[in-house]
Image (spheres, rainbow, N blue to C red):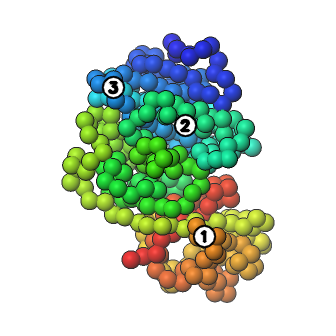
Amino acid sequence: MISMEQSTQAQFGKFYYWENPQPDAIGRTVIEFLKRLPGPTHIHVTGADSSRCRAVATLLHGNEPSGLQAVFEALRQRITPIVDIHYFIPSVDAARQAPGFIYRMLPHQKDLNRCFREPFGDSEQDLLAQDLLQRLKKYNPECVIDIHNTSGSSPSFGVTTFMDERHDALASLFTHRMIVTDLLLGSLMEISEAMMPTVTIECGGVEDTESSLMATEGLLKYITYADVLSIKHTDMSLEFFHKPLRVELLDGSDIAYGDHSLIDDGVTLLADIEHHNFGYVGPDNRLGFVSGDLAANLTVMDIHGKEKLFDYFVLEEGELYPTRRLKLFMVTTNPEIARKDCLFYLVEAA
C-alpha cells in the first residue's frame, strides 16, 4: 500500500509519498506501475548509507516514458541503492490518458518544466514545482538527474546550465554528448548553481528502441556507484555543444510537415527533418517552406533579446535554407510541441 504523508489523497499541487515499494506492489509492467501511481508521486528507497541521498525526476512530461521505465526496472529488480534515492514522478495524470504516454501535459495546463523559476504562479503545475523544490531543500540530495525523451527520433545527450566536473560526471553515466546552455526557461536543471548539481538527460525518442535501455543502464549506475560526481567512474570523453538557440514560431504562424508547402500562413518543415538531429546542415540543405515573410513566421532570439533569425536562415523562392553550417538537435515532427515549445535548437558548427 502507498503510505501517504497525511491522508489518502494528496493536496492540490502536492506529491503522494511512497516509501520502499515492493516488487509485488508496482505491477508486472511499466503500464501497471503507472496505473498504480495515485497521482504525482514521491518514491523514497532506503539505501545502504542513509546519511546521503540522490534525487531523480522523470515524467515531468507525460509523453516521455523512458525514465519511468528505468525507475520501474530498478524497483522490480530489488536493487538496494548505495544511498537513499528519492524519485519524483509528477505528470502521472497526463501519462495515463488513453492510449497512454501521449500528452506532454493535459490540455490547458502549463508545461511543468517551465515552472521552476520565480515568479511562481498558483496553477497546479506551479504548486507542484514548488513542492518538488521544497522536498529537494528538505532532503538536500548530493545531486539530481532529470530524465526525459526527446520530442523526435534523436541520439541521447545531456543538458546543463552549469559546466564543471560534477555535471560532466553525471551526464557521462548516460551519454557522451553534453549541451551547455545559458537559456533560462524555468526548467528543473536551472536549480543547479543555487542548490545542487543537476543535469537533464535526454534519452532519445520514444520510438527509438535504445532509449529505455540507455535510461535504465544509466540509472542503475547512478543509484549504485559510490561516487557519481567525479569523472573517474568513466573513460568516456564528452562532446560539448555550447549556447544553443531556439527556433520558434511567432504568434499567428502555424506549422506542418511535408514535401511541399501545406499551409497558406506558416511554416512547413520537411517530413523527415528529425533525421537531422545531431547532424550537420548547411546552405545546400533545404529544411522546408515558409508562406509569407520569414520574419513574420519564425524567431531565433539570443539571451539578450536580440533577433538572430537572419544570421542563420534565408528564404529562396519560399524555401527555407540555413545561411551557414549548423548542428540541429531536439528537432520535432510533433506539431503541438512545435507550436507550444520550439521547432528545434541549433548551435553553430565548429
Q: Rounded to the nearest whole Å, what is the CA distance between mark 2 and mark 1?
A: 27 Å
Whole-percent x, y for residue 122 in the image: 73, 38
- Disc 1 marks which residue? 304
* 211, above or below 347, in the image: above
Dividing the picture into quadrants, the one containing residue 216 is top left
Q: Tell me the kind of residue under disc 2.
A: Leu
Left or right placement of residue 141 versus residue 80 in this view: right
Image coordinates of residue 111 in percent, x first then y, are: 64, 46
Please tell me how crowded label 2 is: few (under 14), some (14-19), or many (20+) other residues with Cα within 10 Å.
Answer: some
Query: Outermost residue toward the front?
Result: 194
Query: How much space separates mark 3 and mark 1, taking CA atoms?
Result: 43 Å
Question: Regarding mark 2 in the picture, which secondary structure is present there?
Answer: helix
The quadrant in which the C terminus is found is bottom left
The answer to whether residue 181 is above or below residue 83 is: below
Q: Secondary structure at mark 1?
A: loop
Identify the residue at image location x=37%, y=64%: 240
Q: Residues within 10 Å of mark 1 (few under 14, many from 20)?
A: few
Q: Tell me how far mark 3 sits from mark 2, CA to CA.
A: 20 Å
Q: Is residue 272 left or right of residue 24?
A: right
Q: Which mark is residue 133?
A: 2
Mark nearer the N terminus (3 vs 1): 3
Amino acid bearing label 1: His
Tell me where residue 251 appears, x and y as whole percent. 76, 64
Q: Are marks 3 and 2 in contact (CB under 8 Å)?
A: no
Residue at 67% over, 72% down: 298
Residue 202 is left or right of residue 97, and the answer is: left
With respect to residue 255, does 175 lie above or below?
above
Residue 47, compared with residue 217, is above or below; it is above
Mark nearer the N terminus (3 vs 2): 3
User: Which residue position holds label 3?
Assistant: 51
